[in-house]
Image (tube, helix red, strand yellow):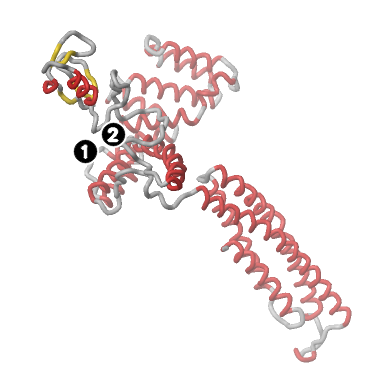
């Protein structure tokens, strides 16, 4: 809607001036200034759309790409055409109205030829505006489709998809935990200045004091391409961190290869990285192969990927700060889980069924890192829950509580026999196991 108002402002400025000033003396310079401001606002709008594009999902991007293409076409095509038309009107205005012999405004009259020229200019301007209006309607249609796709793909109401949902806004304890989680994450990626700002504003209590100046110095040097500063710091502070040291040496060698300094890179590997051969022999051989091979060899393209440099940066930041945060894994799991739960909620609501029937997610979410251990009963072949926890028998074997109760019911004696060994024990001797 606001984009429509922007373009409508351009149209109104041109039409109002051409209609009102065609036969009346006025200063046309203001029109050019207004049009220039409108085009400048259009350029700003394009940059906003480009930034917005990076965070959208695929269905929205399909329509957003079309809108962006049309906006870029307008930005490329129309400023010059509008400017040329304004200059033509200005020229007619100056020649036919200002450069007349009449001294009194009441005596200023247009000849038949002048009126024809003005009418022809107005007709061309109207055709120009009609064409611009037609393109605007197409852009407006694409932007409207983007809005509909956003409403269809992004759900504002996420209530009911998480059991025992935590309130992190009003609950002070939960808010403190979330702030601490974000604080640790910022430190673990080397954003110590941002973390310090959060600590002051949110009153976060760090687990240990951090030498912010030292961390900032090492991280800024690394981001500026000075890997030797980080190497020297680790060799003094953490000489046993050989894996990170190798990664830093490798980044320094890759930097020399990108700069075309193959001989210096080879000499550096021989003098500084020979001690890594016993532990990182294969990786060192791979790096040496990249040195002697052509720079554009596809086999060694992985060494030049920016993601590798970012991984080393995060590992260095975690070592410097002494913190590690699972925030990225939590967000990744949530991103994978929420869409499935939203779709399932719609199905369950239609059937008037509950989304959660146990202390587990109703759908399986594939995640790389499982942060909670699970136990599957070897007898009943089901996973344990809080109501059916794992129980350790006196002999050491572990079964579920339901299996233990069934064995106790089936036993004719007070003692029951372990299903996996000859040892007998009492059901009261079983202890709950916590993972």
Residue 399, placed above or below residue 149? above
Give residue 67's mark.
none
The residue depicted at 72 percent of the width and 64 percent of the height is: 83
- Contact? badges 2 and 1 (CB < 8 Å): yes
The x and y percentages for residue 53 are 55, 47
The residue depicted at 75 percent of the width and 62 percent of the height is: 131
Q: Tell me if I can see residue 239 in this picture.
A: no
Q: Quadrant of residue 333?
A: top left
Q: Tell me if I can see residue 304 in this picture.
A: yes
Front residue (pair 128, 236): 128
- Which image quadrant: the C terminus? top left
130 horizontally vs 170: left or right: right
Front residue (pair 9, 409): 409
Residue denoted by label 1: 207
Residue denoted by label 2: 323
Mark earlier in primary sequence (2, 1): 1
For the view shown, which residue lies furthest in the front direction?
412
The residue depicted at 37 percent of the width and 43 percent of the height is: 354
């Amino acid at each position: 809607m606001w984009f429509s108002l922007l373009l409508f402002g351009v149209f109104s400025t041109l039409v109002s001036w051409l209609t009102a000033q065609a036969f009346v003396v006025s200063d046309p310079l203001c029109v050019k200034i207004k049009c220039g401001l409108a085009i400048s606002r259009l350029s700003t709008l394009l940059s906003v759309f480009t930034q917005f594009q990076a965070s959208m999902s695929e269905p929205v991007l399909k329509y957003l790409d079309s809108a962006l293409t049309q906006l870029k076409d307008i930005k490329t095509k129309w400023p010059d055409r509008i400017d040329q038309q304004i200059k033509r009107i200005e020229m007619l205005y100056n020649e036919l109205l200002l450069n007349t012999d009449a001294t009194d405004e009441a005596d200023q009259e247009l000849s038949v030829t002048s009126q024809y020229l003005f009418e022809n200019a107005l007709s061309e301007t109207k055709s120009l505006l009609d064409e611009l209006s037609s393109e605007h309607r197409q852009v407006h249609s694409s932007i409207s489709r983007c809005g509909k796709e956003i409403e269809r793909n992004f759900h504002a109401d996420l209530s009911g998809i998480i059991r025992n949902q935590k309130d992190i806004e009003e609950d002070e304890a939960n808010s403190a935990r979330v702030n601490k989680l974000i604080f640790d994450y910022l430190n673990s990626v080397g954003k110590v200045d941002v973390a310090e700002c959060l600590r002051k504003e949110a009153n976060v209590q760090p687990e240990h004091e951090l030498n912010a100046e030292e961390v900032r110095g090492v991280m800024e040097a690394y981001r500026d391409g000075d890997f030797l500063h980080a190497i020297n710091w680790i060799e003094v502070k953490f000489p046993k961190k050989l894996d990170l040291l190798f990664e830093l040496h490798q980044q320094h060698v890759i930097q020399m290869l990108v700069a075309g300094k193959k001989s210096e890179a080879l000499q550096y590997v021989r003098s500084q990285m020979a001690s890594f051969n016993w532990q990182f022999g294969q990786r060192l051989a791979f790096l040496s192969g990249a040195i002697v091979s052509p720079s554009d060899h596809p086999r060694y393209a992985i060494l030049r990927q920016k993601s590798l440099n970012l991984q080393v940066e995060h590992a260095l930041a975690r070592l410097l700060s002494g913190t590690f945060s699972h925030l990225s894994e939590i967000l990744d799991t949530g991103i994978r889980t929420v869409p499935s739960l939203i779709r399932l909620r719609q199905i369950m609501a239609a059937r008037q069924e509950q989304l959660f029937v146990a202390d587990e997610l109703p759908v399986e979410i594939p995640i790389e890192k499982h942060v909670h251990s699970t136990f599957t009963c070897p007898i009943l072949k089901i996973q344990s829950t809080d109501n059916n926890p794992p129980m350790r028998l006196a002999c050491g074997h572990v079964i579920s509580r339901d299996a233990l109760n069934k064995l106790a019911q089936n036993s004719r004696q007070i003692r029951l026999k372990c299903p996996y060994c000859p040892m007998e024990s009492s059901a009261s001797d079983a202890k709950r196991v916590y993972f």
